[in-house]
Image: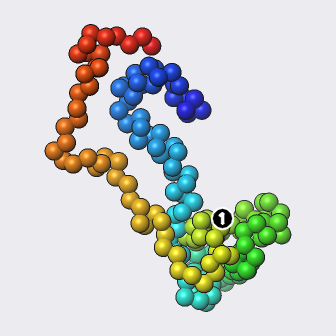
Amino acid sequence: MSKNGIPTNLFQLIKLQRQQPELLLRLWHVAFDPILKTMEGKYMNFANDDEILDLFQTKLVTYTKTGKPSYTKAKNAMKFYSLMRQMGWQKTYKLYNKTTFHDALQHLIDCGISKSHLQNLHKNPNGKVIPFVRLFELKMADQLPHDYVQPVSSYSPKKQGLYLVA
């Protein structure tokens, strides 16, 4: 919490939460957004390698000075994807230098393939994957029934005349 500028003293935390009612939502996002980001991705289920290659050719096409399309990036992405499927994340990582691996990985992510799909591709090379993010929708502002009234604590400083020292 201190890394994110949140006080670790309980009384200061309560005071801050009263000043910033959205604090808990913000902290939730700090904790879970990186996890959910690894699961993002549009394309998870491919019928065959031709479909994957078509995706890469559509998303990673570049053009030469003469205006001709070049599919070198797409072919390299296909090779990298196939290697990830065949050997797995760790072994593929060891074959590449760090920069090249991350560049190739970023190309696949830019095409809409999630990092979590790639991390598990070796275990489930032909299986269908249901993206977790599509199943999981969190509406923080819509967590309570419409007629819910928040109870007032009998320990509230206003009711008891108590004062919290910060």
Would residue 99 be seen by someone viewing this image from the given angle?
A: yes
Pick the residue in front: 135 or 52.
135
Q: Amino acid at mark 1?
A: Gln
Pick the residue in front: 157 or 57.
157
The residue that label 1 is drawn on is 106
Q: Position of residue 132 (x, y in %)?
A: 48, 65
Q: Is residue 152 left or right of residue 139?
A: left
Q: Is residue 19 left or right of residue 64?
A: left
Quadrant (top left, top right, bottom left, bottom right) of the N terminus: top right
Would residue 61 be seen by someone viewing this image from the given angle?
A: no
Quadrant (top left, top right, bottom left, bottom right) of the C terminus: top left
Q: Position of residue 51 (x, y in %)?
A: 57, 87
Q: Position of residue 38 (x, y in %)?
A: 57, 60
Q: Position of residue 67 (x, y in %)?
A: 65, 80
Vertical placement of 38 versus 127: above or below?
above
Pick the residue in front: 82 or 102.
82
Residue that protrudes farthest toward the left in the picture: 147
Q: Residue at x 35, y 48 (%)?
A: 140
Colour treatment of the image: rainbow
Q: Quadrant of residue 57?
A: bottom right
Q: Quadrant of residue 77?
A: bottom right
Q: Quadrant of residue 127?
A: bottom right
Q: Residue at x 64, y 81 (%)?
A: 125
Residue that protrudes farthest toward the front in the picture: 154
Q: Is residue 34 left or right of residue 145?
A: right
Local packing at callout 1 (Cα closer than 10 Å; few below 14, some 14-19, many 20+) is: some
Q: Residue at x 39, y 28 (%)?
A: 17
Q: Is residue 96 left or right of residue 147?
A: right
